[in-house]
Image (cartoon, coloured by chain):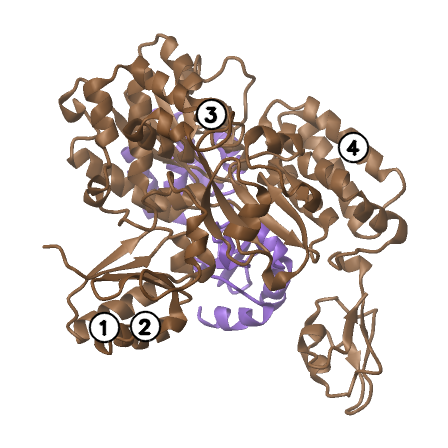
C-alpha cells in the first residue's frame, strides 16, 4: 500500500494564493504521463511562506528534497530532472537531505511543538494524524487520568494562554472545574483578528485534529460535553478543514457519546464569525455565539463562573489547545524544559514585513528578538537598516533596535510597552514611518471599537484625528502631550482589552521614536518619506537625459519636458505616487 | 422580494428551527442566498423567528460581513493588514479605485465589481494582496491591477 515515493504540495491559504493548485495539477499530469509511481499528498503550511509554492519530494534516491519558489511552468522541468534524468535542478531546491541547501538552518533554530504536524501531514486525513501519535493523549487521559490529574499536569507544564494575555491555562481549567453546573461549555477562540497574524489560521488549516484533541482533553478536565470553535469568517479553508476533521473524528468515535468506550461524551460545532475584531475578546465572543451584537461585558463574573448562556465556560485559543496533547503525551516536565522560568514552552510567530524569510516560525520562549529576526528570519530585505519590530498587532507596540536583545517571554515583552500578543511580528525598516504606523493601528481600533465605552469610542477617534493632522503636516506643539493624556484615559476608561490596549501603538512609538513625531510637527517633514503631504518628488537636472520614461509613467500628466531636454514635475498636479521614480533608469528622480 | 426569495429564507429558517442563538448563521445563510440583506428580508425573518426587527438590524449593522445593499458580480477585497500596509497597500487601493472609478466600499455602475477594504486576509508573506471572489493575488504592484481585472 505504502508508496516509496511521496510528494507533498503545501496547500494552506498562502500556498493556494501563490498558485499551489496549478502546481498540484501539473504534478498530477506529470506523474500520469511518465507513469511515476508516487503518492501525491496535500499538506498544510510548511512555514516558509516567502518561498511559496513549496513541494517536498521524499524518495530513496535523494531523501527529502524541498523545492521552493515554484511556478506551474517550472514543474515539468523539475520533475523530469528529478525522476527521469535523476539530476535534480538544484536552483529550485531550498533544502534537502543529500543535496545541500542553506535554508535548513531556519528550521534548526526552531522547536516545533504546536507546528509538529503542519506541513508534514495531510490535514484532511485523520489516519496520518493518528500515525504520528494523534489521539494517544486523549486515550491516556480517558483511561488513566482523572480530571484533576489532567489539570495538575497542565499546571505543572507552565502553559500560559497564547491569545496574548498569558493567563496560566491549568488555573483557568481549575476554575471552570470547581464551578458545579448541569452544563458547561468549552470554546476555542479562533477569531484571529490582528492584522499581520496568521498563526491560528495555519494551525487550523494544517493540523485541525491537534486543536480538536486539545479541546477534548480540556472538556474532560472541566466536565463539559459541548464545545464551540468560533472561527473567523475570513478563513474559509480553515472552516472547511475543521468540519472535515470533526466529521472524521465522529466516524472514529473520538467525538460523540461514550468516547473510546468511556462514559465521556463531547459534541463540537464550528461557529463562523461575521467580521468583528472585538469578538476576539472572550465575553464579546460569547455574546456573538448567543446570536447578539458582540459587545464585551464586565468581568467578573469570569467565563469560568458564568459564561456562555450563563454557564461555566472555558475559553482558550487555537495555539493553546494545540499544545495540550503534546504535553499529555510527553509529560509536563518535558514541556517545561523549553522556555524561561515564567514562560514555558514555545511560541508561534507570523514573521512578516520587511523580512527576508517571512513565514510561520515556532521558537522556544526566551530566544531574543534579534535571533528571531536575524537567525530565523534571515534579516532585513535588501539588508536595509532595521527600525522597529511590531508585536501584538493593534494591542501591541513597536520595539526599537536598542531593545532587540529582549527575550521573547510574556514579562520581558510587557516591560517594553509592547505585549507578546497572539504572535504577529511585523518587521520594519527605515522606509516605514512610525507616526504613520501608529495612525494605521489607531484607524483600525477606532473602526473596530464596539462603541460601548466612551473613551474607547470617542477617545480613539480624537487621537486618530490628531494623528491624521500630524501626518498631513498640520501638527501643532502640544499634540504629543494630548495624545499621551488621551491614551492614559482610554486605557483606564475601557471595559475590555480592545480599549485598554488600543493606545499601545501610539505610546510605544512616542516613547521610542519621539524624534519622528517632532520632525512631523515642528519641521513638517517625514524622515521615512512615507507621509504624502510632507514629501515631494523632484527631477535632478544633472542626471535627467530627457528620455521621457517618467512622463509616460505619470498617471496624471504632471511631468512636462521635450525629448532630450530636462523634464520637470508640476507639484500642483503631482499625486506623489512615485511611478516616475520607479520608471527612471538614471536615478534622476529624488524624493524629498 | 420575489416569491422564490421568501422560499429561500423559509428553507434557511427551517434548518435552524429550535436551535438557540442562531440569528447570525440565519443571516449569513440568507445573505449567501440573496446576496444582501434587504429591509424586507429582515422584516420577514423577524416575523418568523419572533426576534424584534430592531435586534436583527442591530446585529446586521454590527458585523462587517453583513451588507444591506446589492453587490456587484465580483467582490474585490483589498487587504489592509499590517504587512500589506508596510508593503504599500494604499497604492494598490488607489490604483483599483482609479481603474474602476469607485469609492471605497462602492460598486461599479455596471454592477460588475464591489470593492471592499479588509483588515487582514492572512497571506502576509505575499503582501500586498487582494482577493477577487475566492482567488487571492499576491506580490502586487499597481501596474498589475489592469491585467487582473481583465480576467473578470
Please tell me the numbered disc located at residue B2: none
Identified at 80% across, 52% down, the residue is A472
Q: Quadrant of the C terminus of chain B?
A: bottom left
Quadrant in the picture for residue A589: bottom right
Query: Do the residues indicated by labels 2 and 1 lie within the same chain of the protein?
Result: yes
Residues under numbered marks 3 and 4 in contact, where contact means CB atoms less than 8 Å apart:
no
**In front: mark 1 or mark 3?**
1
Q: Which residue is mark 4?
A: A484
Q: CA distance from mark 1 to mark 3?
A: 56 Å
Q: CA distance from mark 1 to mark 4?
A: 63 Å
Q: Which residue is mark 1?
A: A83
User: What is the x, y in percent for residue A197?
Assistant: 51, 45
To which chain does the residue with label 3 belong? A
Query: Do the residues indicated by labels 2 and 4 lie within the same chain of the protein?
Result: yes
To which chain does the residue with label 1 belong? A
Q: CA distance from mark 3 to mark 4?
A: 32 Å
Amino acid at each position: 500500500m505504502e508508496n516509496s515515493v511521496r510528494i507533498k504540495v503545501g496547500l494552506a491559504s498562502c500556498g493556494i494564493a501563490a498558485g499551489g493548485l496549478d502546481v498540484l495539477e501539473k504534478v498530477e499530469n506529470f506523474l500520469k504521463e511518465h507513469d511515476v509511481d508516487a503518492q501525491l499528498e496535500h499538506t498544510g503550511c510548511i512555514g516558509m511562506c516567502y518561498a511559496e509554492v513549496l513541494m517536498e519530494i521524499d524518495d530513496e534516491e535523494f531523501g527529502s528534497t524541498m523545492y521552493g519558489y515554484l511556478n506551474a511552468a517550472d514543474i515539468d522541468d523539475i520533475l523530469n530532472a528529478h525522476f527521469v534524468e535523476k539530476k535534480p535542478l538544484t536552483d529550485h531546491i531550498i533544502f534537502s537531505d543529500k543535496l545541500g541547501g542553506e535554508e535548513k538552518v531556519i528550521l534548526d533554530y526552531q522547536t516545533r511543538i504546536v507546528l509538529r504536524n503542519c506541513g508534514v501531514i495531510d490535514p484532511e486525513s485523520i489516519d496520518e494524524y493518528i500515525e504520528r501519535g494523534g489521539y494517544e493523549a486523549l486515550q491516556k487521559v480517558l483511561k488513566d487520568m482523572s480530571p484533576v490529574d489532567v489539570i495538575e499536569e497542565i499546571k505543572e507544564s507552565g502553559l500560559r494562554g497564547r491569545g496574548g494575555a498569558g493567563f496560566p491555562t491549568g488555573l483557568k481549567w481549575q476554575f471552570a472545574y470547581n464551578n458545579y453546573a448541569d452544563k458547561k461549555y468549552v470554546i476555542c477562540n479562533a477569531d484571529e483578528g490582528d492584522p499581520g497574524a496568521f498563526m491560528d489560521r495555519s494551525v487550523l488549516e494544517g493540523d485541525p485534529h491537534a486543536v480538536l484533541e486539545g479541546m477534548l482533553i480540556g472538556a474532560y478536565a472541566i466536565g463539559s460535553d459541548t464545545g464551540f470553535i468560533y472561527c473567523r469568517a475570513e478563513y474559509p479553508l480553515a472552516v472547511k478543514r475543521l468540519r472535515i476533521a470533526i466529521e472524521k473524528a465522529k466516524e472514529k468515535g473520538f467525538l460523540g457519546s461514550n468516547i473510546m468506550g468511556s462514559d465521556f461524551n463531547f459534541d463540537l460545532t464550528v461557529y463562523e464569525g461575521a467580521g468583528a475584531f472585538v469578538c476576539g475578546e472572550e465575553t464579546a465572543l460569547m455574546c456573538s455565539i448567543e446570536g447578539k451584537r458582540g459587545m464585551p461585558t464586565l468581568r467578573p463574573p469570569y467565563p469560568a463562573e458564568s459564561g456562555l448562556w450563563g454557564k461555566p465556560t472555558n475559553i482558550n485559543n487555537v495555539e493553546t489547545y494545540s499544545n495540550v496533547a503534546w504535553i499529555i503525551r510527553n509529560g509536563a516536565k518535558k514541556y517545561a524544559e523549553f522556555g524561561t522560568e515564567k514562560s514555558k514552552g514555545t511560541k508561534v510567530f507570523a514573521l512578516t514585513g520587511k523580512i527576508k524569510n517571512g513565514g510561520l516560525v515556532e521558537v522556544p520562549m526566551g530566544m531574543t528578538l534579534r535571533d528571531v529576526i536575524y537567525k530565523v528570519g534571515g534579516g532585513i530585505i535588501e539588508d536595509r537598516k532595521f527600525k522597529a519590530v511590531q508585536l501584538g498587532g493593534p494591542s501591541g507596540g513597536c520595539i526599537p533596535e536598542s531593545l532587540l536583545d529582549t527575550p521573547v517571554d510574556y514579562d520581558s515583552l510587557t516591560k517594553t510597552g509592547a505585549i507578546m500578543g497572539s504572535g504577529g511580528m511585523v518587521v520594519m525598516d527605515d522606509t516605514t514611518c512610525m507616526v504613520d504606523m501608529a495612525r494605521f493601528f489607531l484607524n483600525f481600533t477606532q473602526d473596530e471599537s464596539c462603541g460601548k465605552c466612551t473613551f474607547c469610542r470617542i477617545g480613539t477617534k480624537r487621537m486618530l484625528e490628531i494623528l491624521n493632522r500630524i501626518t498631513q503636516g498640520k501638527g501643532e506643539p502640544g499634540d504629543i502631550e494630548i495624545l499621551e493624556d488621551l491614551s492614559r484615559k482610554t486605557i483606564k476608561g475601557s471595559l475590555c482589552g480592545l480599549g485598554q490596549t488600543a493606545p499601545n501603538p501610539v505610546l510605544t512609538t512616542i516613547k521610542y521614536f519621539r524624534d519622528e513625531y517632532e520632525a512631523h510637527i515642528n519641521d513638517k517633514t517625514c524622515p521615512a518619506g512615507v507621509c504624502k503631504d510632507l514629501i515631494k518628488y523632484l527631477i535632478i537636472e544633472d542626471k535627467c537625459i530627457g528620455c521621457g520614461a517618467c512622463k509616460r509613467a505619470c498617471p496624471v500628466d504632471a511631468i512636462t519636458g521635450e525629448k532630450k531636454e530636462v523634464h520637470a514635475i508640476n507639484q500642483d498636479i503631482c499625486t506623489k505616487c512615485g511611478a516616475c521614480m520607479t520608471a527612471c533608469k538614471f536615478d534622476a528622480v529624488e524624493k524629498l | 422580494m420575489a416569491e422564490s426569495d421568501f422560499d429561500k429564507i423559509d428553507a434557511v429558517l427551517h434548518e435552524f428551527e429550535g436551535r438557540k442563538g442562531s440569528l447570525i448563521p440565519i443571516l449569513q445563510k440568507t445573505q449567501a442566498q440573496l446576496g444582501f440583506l434587504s429591509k424586507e428580508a429582515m422584516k420577514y425573518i423577524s416575523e418568523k423567528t419572533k426576534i424584534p426587527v430592531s435586534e436583527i438590524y442591530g446585529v446586521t449593522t454590527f458585523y462587517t460581513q453583513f451588507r444591506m445593499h446589492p453587490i456587484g458580480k465580483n467582490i474585490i477585497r483589498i487587504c489592509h493588514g499590517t504587512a500589506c500596509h508596510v508593503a504599500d497597500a494604499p497604492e494598490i487601493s488607489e490604483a483599483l479605485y482609479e481603474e474602476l472609478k469607485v469609492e471605497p466600499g462602492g460598486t461599479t455602475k455596471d454592477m460588475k465589481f464591489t470593492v471592499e477594504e479588509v483588515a487582514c486576509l492572512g497571506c502576509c508573506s505575499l503582501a500586498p494582496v487582494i482577493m477577487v471572489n475566492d482567488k487571492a493575488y499576491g506580490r502586487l504592484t499597481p501596474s498589475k491591477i489592469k491585467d487582473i481585472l481583465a480576467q473578470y
